[in-house]
Amino acid sequence: MKFTTKLIIGTIIIIGLMGAAIYAMTDDTTQTKEAGIDEIKAERIALRELNGGIVTKIHMEESPDGSKEYEVTIVKKDQTFEVDIDTLTGKVSEISQYELKKNKPQNISTNISIEEAKKIALDQVNGRGTVTEINLDTFHNRLVYDVEIGTIYRREAEVFVDAANGKVLKFKEVD
């Protein structure tokens, strides 16, 4: 019986060492590919590329080939820019420029940052969700952050945060 116990323990040790060796030899690139950049870094890259402006919208898009990129919309003077940034490398893939629409506010200024608006909006769902899109928009003649959140159980929430004072003007949860 002692011989059988030693044989089993020896086999377990050898299998464990082989598993560790195989794991050490595996390609680790799938983990590093997924890391990429986050929205904050994408926003900084876009602002640096355009030498400033006000970020009015940022969201991630997935192309048919499976690659992902952040689309950052920036207002600067009387122009609107869309800056596309690869989520893995942080490289700017495209910059589009448009005339600012006449019915949009010309002098855009906010007291609440986009990050503060995200936090306020996430507090409405007790922090249980992910911001899927955020836009600077108007609601009842007020400048607001329109924040869309994917919540648990595949529900969605929309929160309007006043860009001047951070108050929640509208909260709507959709199935």
Image (cartoon, rainbow, N blue to C red):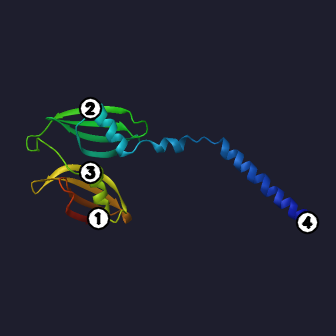
Residue 108 in the image, given as x and y percentages of width and height = 15, 44
- Residue under circle 3? 134
Q: Amino acid at mark 3?
A: Ile
Q: Which residue is mark 1?
A: 124
Callout 1 amino acid: Gln
How far from the left and from the top, in percent, is residue 67?
Answer: 41, 40
Check disc 3: other Cα within 10 Å, few if <14, some if 14-19, many if 20+.
Answer: many
Q: Nearer the viewer, residue 94 or 120?
A: 120
Q: Quadrant of residue 36?
A: top left
Q: Residue furthest bottom?
A: 1
State the separation of the CA atoms marked 1 and 2.
33 Å
Foreground mark, 3 or 2, reads 2
In the rendering, at what x and y percent does residue 167 appear? 20, 60
Mark 2 lies on a secondary structure that is helix
- Which quarter of the picture shows residue 148? bottom left
Q: Nearer the viewer, mark 3 or mark 1?
A: 1
Residue type at tag 2: Leu
Earlier residue among tags 4 and 3: 4
Judge whether residue 81 can be spotted in this image. yes
C-alpha separation, residue under disc 3 versus residue under disc 1: 15 Å
